[in-house]
Amino acid sequence: MIGRLNHVAIAVPDLAAASAKYREQLGANVGAPQALPEHGVTVVFIDTGNSKIELLEALGENSPIAGFIAKNPAGGVHHLCFEVGDIAQAVEQLQATGARVLGDGRARIGAHGNPVVFLHPKDFHGALIELEEVRG
Amino acid sequence: MIGRLNHVAIAVPDLAAASAKYREQLGANVGAPQALPEHGVTVVFIDTGNSKIELLEALGENSPIAGFIAKNPAGGVHHLCFEVGDIAQAVEQLQATGARVLGDGRARIGAHGNPVVFLHPKDFHGALIELEEVRG
């Protein structure tokens, strides 16, 4: 079911400082910040050639990463995103095996304009897994 | 400096159970376990096509992931590994910018037979970063 590792998201308290670190200290290919108010985050993508790192900063009062930053003030790895071909089918298969899909279980349009779901980290060894539908 | 995202390592308390979850629930391409007593871990690789997930279970009494599992009994994302072309040069550049390389700062031979170093997670927003020399 899962395909490519689309990205690894790292939540950070200060996106400008994190972008500068990755660009200047690690010599990474760091993009421009994009504010996504409908998702409650500002994102910066780092292109690693084969995959991406997504740096996330909370935006607005109800940011989905505010709680994570409160618990991890320095930041930390927030989630891993794998691509799937058909997200409705993936959700059905996962739920049939007892895996919990967060929210109402239905896919929403994610930060990249594709349908996404998140799986309960307690079902996957403490890792928050995002599935994103990417049609081949 | 940093190139491809070589792998994302997830430390787990039970490698057989984690392998079964990724294989059966997520339909992932999960390899066979490899005991690496000299590194204090047993590893399983999951091939995502473009990158890899490395599941790690502690092996022996002085496993480098024992402390992590003690703090995160369910498991969690342990580190991200980026490829570099010349690790000695990478270390020199990083240290010149004030980034801390763990241990004595010299590369050691990692689990894949290549020279590796780890960077202090406090310098990179809570993410433990491994650099692995992969000659192109």
Image (cartoon, coloured by chain):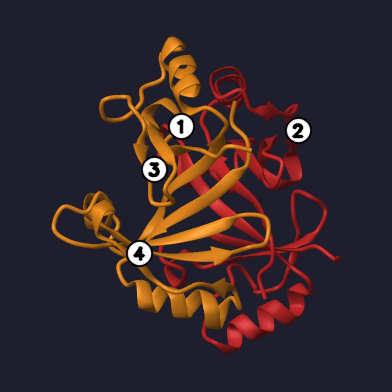
Chain colours: A orange, B red
Estimate the x, y position of residue B57 in percent, counting from the top left: 60, 34
Give the vertical position of A60 relative to A78 (above or below). Answer: below
Label 3 neighbour load within 10 Å: few <14, some 14-19, many 20+: few
Residue under disc 4 on the same chain as residue under disc 2: no
Q: Nearer the viewer, residue A84 or A67?
A: A84
Residue at x 49%, y 15% (from the top left corner)? A93
Circle number at residue B34? 2
Disc number lying in front (3 or 2): 2
Residue type at numbered disc 1: His
* Quadrant into which the C terminus of chain B falls: bottom right
Q: Residue furthest left?
A: A61
Residue B123 can be seen in this image = yes
Q: CA distance from mark 4 to mark 2?
A: 34 Å
Circle number at residue A12? 4
Residue under disc 4 on the same chain as residue under disc 1: yes
Residue under disc 3 on the same chain as residue under disc 4: no
Residue type at numbered disc 3: Lys
| Chain hosting mark 1 | A
Q: CA distance from mark 4 to mark 1?
A: 22 Å
Estimate the x, y position of residue A119 in percent, counting from the top left: 39, 31
Disc number lying in front (1 or 2): 1
Disc number lying in front (4 or 1): 4
Left or right: residue B13 versus residue A69 is: right
| Chain hosting mark 3 | B
Q: Which residue is mark 1?
A: A125
Disc number lying in front (3 or 4): 4
